[in-house]
Image (cartoon, rainbow, N blue to C red):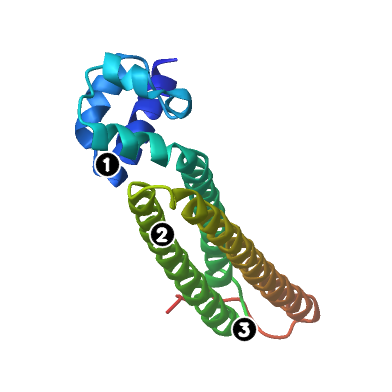
Amino acid sequence: SELSRQQAARELEEWLSQLGLPELAPLLLSEGVDLETVQVLEDTDLIRMNVGALGTRRMLLNARSTVTHYKQLRETIARLEAEAARKESALREALLQARSAAEGGDAATARASELAEQLRAERERSAGLQLALDEQAECTLAEAARGESWREHALAFAHDLEAVQERQHAIAEAQRNIAEESHRSIQSLLRRQRRATDTGKGGCFLTEGP
C-alpha cells in the first residue's frame, strides 16, 4: 500500500542519515530499494546506479549487517512507547476514580499522584535508553565504515540490544505493577465507602486531586 511504501522510504532515509549518506536516499528509492533489498545489493549494483565513489560504496556495503538490528531497535522502542501510553491511560482513569471517591479520597488521590510520578520517571528513563540506543547505533555504523572490524562491532551492538530489551521488559513489568497497585488502592477505598454508606456512618464528598 501507499502507506507501507511511505514508511519504508522513511526507514531507509533515517538509516542513510545515520550513515552520513542522506544524499543517496532519492537515488536508492528511485530504484525501488528499501531496507530489505539494500541487504542484497552488490558493488556492481551501486556502480550501475552511478554511485561512483569507492568509499561511499564500501561504507554502504559494510553497514548492511546493521539493518536488522536497526529495525529491531525501532520496533522495540515502538512497543515500549505503546505500552507506556496504555499504562498512562489506565493511570488517568484511576486518578478520575480517586477524585470521585468518598472517605479517604485525599489519600487515594495522593497515592495516585505518587504513582503518576513514578510512571513519569520510568518514561524519562525509557527516553534515556532510546537516546543511548541511537548513540550506540551511530557508533556501530561509523565503525562499519572503517573497514573489516565492522563485524565485531555489529555483534557487540546485538549484545547491547539484548541487554536493553531486558531492561525495557523490566520497565514494562514495573509499570504493570504500578497500575495494579493503583487499582487495588481504589477498589479498597470504594469498598470502605460502601460499608460506611450501609452503616450510616460518614458521608460522601468529592475531592480535587493535587
Q: Which mark is residue 136?
A: 2
Q: Which residue is mark 1?
A: 17
Expressed as whole percent of the image width and height from the top left, the position of residue 170 reads 64, 67
Q: Residues within 10 Å of mark 2 (few under 14, many from 20)?
A: some
Q: Residues within 10 Å of mark 3 (few under 14, many from 20)?
A: some
Q: Which residue is mark 3?
A: 104
- Badges 3 and 2: C-beta atoms under 8 Å apart? no
Q: Residue at x 63, y 82 (%)?
A: 103
Q: Nearer the viewer, residue 156 or 186?
A: 156
Could you give the CA–CA distance between mark 3 and mark 2, rounded to whole angstroms? 48 Å
| Identity, as a three-letter code, of the amino acid under mark 2 | Gln
Could you give the CA–CA distance between mark 1 and mark 2, rounded to whole angstroms? 15 Å
| Identity, as a three-letter code, of the amino acid under mark 1 | Ser
Left-right relation of 9 to 104: left
Q: Which corner quadrant of the image does residue 64 belong to? A: top left
Expressed as whole percent of the image width and height from the top left, the position of residue 126 reads 47, 64
| Identity, as a three-letter code, of the amino acid under mark 3 | Gly
In this view, 133 is above or below 199: above
Q: Secondary structure at mark 2?
A: helix
Q: Residue at x 47, y 29 (%)?
A: 39
Q: Which corner quadrant of the image does residue 192 belong to? A: bottom right
Among the two numbered marks 3 and 2 on one chain, the one whose residue lies closer to the N terminus: 3
Q: Residues within 10 Å of mark 1 (few under 14, many from 20)?
A: some
